[in-house]
Amino acid sequence: QLQASGGGLVQSGGSLRLACAYSESASRINAMGWYRQATGKERELIAGIIRTDTTNYADSVKGRFTISRDYAKNTVSLEMNGLKPEDTAVYYCAADESPLGLIRSPAYWGQGTLVTVSS
């Protein structure tokens, strides 16, 4: 239902762009976002976007990451700049009918894509 792509290995300070294509009826998906999970840590929501194109970011990525949504292509992207080794994690796209659902327990998940940032 959600297909993520774009992970890889990048040096510290570099950039990567993640993309997530979704096949569910767009009329039901009002909130989309990106979670990440580093080894030994809990999965955390780092960026979200709702249908009004309002965005929100975790403090750890604010100013470096940008989430965007293309309604025509049914995709949501995460542009990651100024990557740091601590950004190394498996990144997951997620979606839900409501912003609260996206935060608490998204109904839809993509498969993870690994981002590794070397120092």
Image (spheres, grey):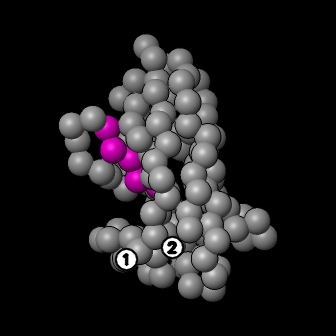
Residue 56 seen by the camera = yes
Q: Which residues are magenta?
A: 34-38
Q: Give neighbour class at mark 1: few <14, some 14-19, many 20+ (Cα, 10 Å).
A: some
Quadrant position of residue 51: bottom right
Extreme right residue here?
Answer: 72
Q: As shown in the figure, which amino acid type bears the numbered disc 1?
A: Gly
Q: Residue at x 46, y 24 (%)?
A: 117
Asked if residue 67 lies in the magenta stretch, the reply is no
Residue 48 seen by the camera = no
As helix, strand or loop, the secondary structure at mark 1 comes to helix
* Tag 1 near tag 2, CB within 8 Å: yes
Q: Is residue 11 left or right of residue 77?
A: left
| Residue 83 percent coordinates (x, y) | 50, 29
- In depth, the one of 47 and 74 nearer the eye is 74
| Residue 84 percent coordinates (x, y) | 44, 26
Q: Is residue 13 above or below residue 93?
A: above
Q: Residue at x 56, y 63 (%)?
A: 2
The residue indicated by pointer 1 is: 101
- In depth, the one of 30 and 24 nearer the eye is 24
Q: Is residue 37 left or right of residue 18?
A: left
As helix, strand or loop, the secondary structure at mark 2 comes to strand
Kindly report the distance in space between the C-alpha atoms of the residues bearing marks 1 and 2: 8 Å
| Quadrant holding the C terminus | top left
Quadrant position of residue 41: top left
Residue 31: numbered disc: 2
Q: Give neighbour class at mark 2: few <14, some 14-19, many 20+ (Cα, 10 Å).
A: many
Q: Is residue 7 above or below residue 9?
A: below
Q: Main secondary structure of the magenta part?
A: strand
Q: Residue at x 41, y 74 (%)?
A: 107
